[in-house]
């Protein structure tokens, strides 16, 4: 599930209200350290909620389509179509 732009993996017994609360608290804590959360895991251990957060990776995927280097969100429709039409090679 996605909450406030953060991927959340939560125990199914937690309510949406509880999940939203923990996301907001953890996000506030990380923002004081100038960091962003990539994934937030919420698990129950008896009556305690275990919060595990993973930092969002600053790595971006850059592609080269007809001589242009850019991330796919900057491509026009023709370049996106060209990117989607490419063959994917799998190393086994």
Image (cartoon, rainbow, N blue to C red):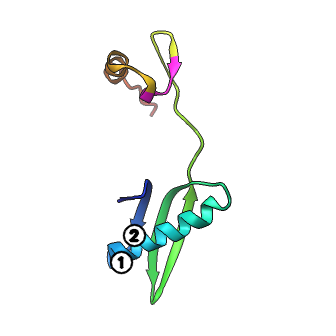
- Across and down, in percent, residue 49 comes to 48, 80
Q: Quadrant of the N terminus?
A: bottom left
Residue found at the very far right of the displayed protein: 33
Q: Position of residue 40 (x, y in %)?
A: 49, 63
Where is 2 relative to 26, above or below? above
Q: Residue most toward the top?
A: 67
Instruction: Answer whether residue 47 is magenta in the image.
Output: no
Badge number at residue 35: none
**Relative to 39, is 32 on the left or the right?**
right
Q: Give the residue at x 49% y 27%.
A: 71
Q: How dense is the environment of label 2, judged by Cα within 10 Å: few (below 14), some, or many (20 and up)?
A: some
Q: Is residue 77 above or below residue 48?
A: above
How packed mark 1 is, by other alpha carbons closer than 10 Å (few <14, some 14-19, many 20 or more), is: few
Q: Please give the residue where the numbered disc 1 appears in the rendered image.
A: 14
The answer to whether the residues at label 1 and label 2 have Cβ atoms under 8 Å apart is yes
Please state the extent of the stretch shown in magenta in the rendering.
69-73
Under circle 2, the secondary element is strand
Between the residue at mark 1 and the residue at mark 2, the CA separation in whole angstroms equals: 7 Å
Q: Which residue is mark 2?
A: 10
């Amino acid at each position: 599930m996605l909450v406030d732009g953060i991927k959340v993996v939560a125990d199914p017994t937690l309510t949406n209200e509880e999940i939203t609360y923990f996301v907001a608290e953890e996000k506030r804590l990380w923002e004081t350290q100038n960091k962003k959360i990539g994934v937030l895991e919420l698990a129950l251990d008896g009556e305690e909620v275990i919060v595990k957060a993973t930092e969002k990776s600053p790595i971006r995927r850059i592609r080269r389509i007809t001589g242009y280097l850019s991330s796919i969100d900057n491509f026009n429709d023709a370049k996106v179509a060209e990117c989607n039409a490419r063959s994917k090679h799998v190393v086994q």
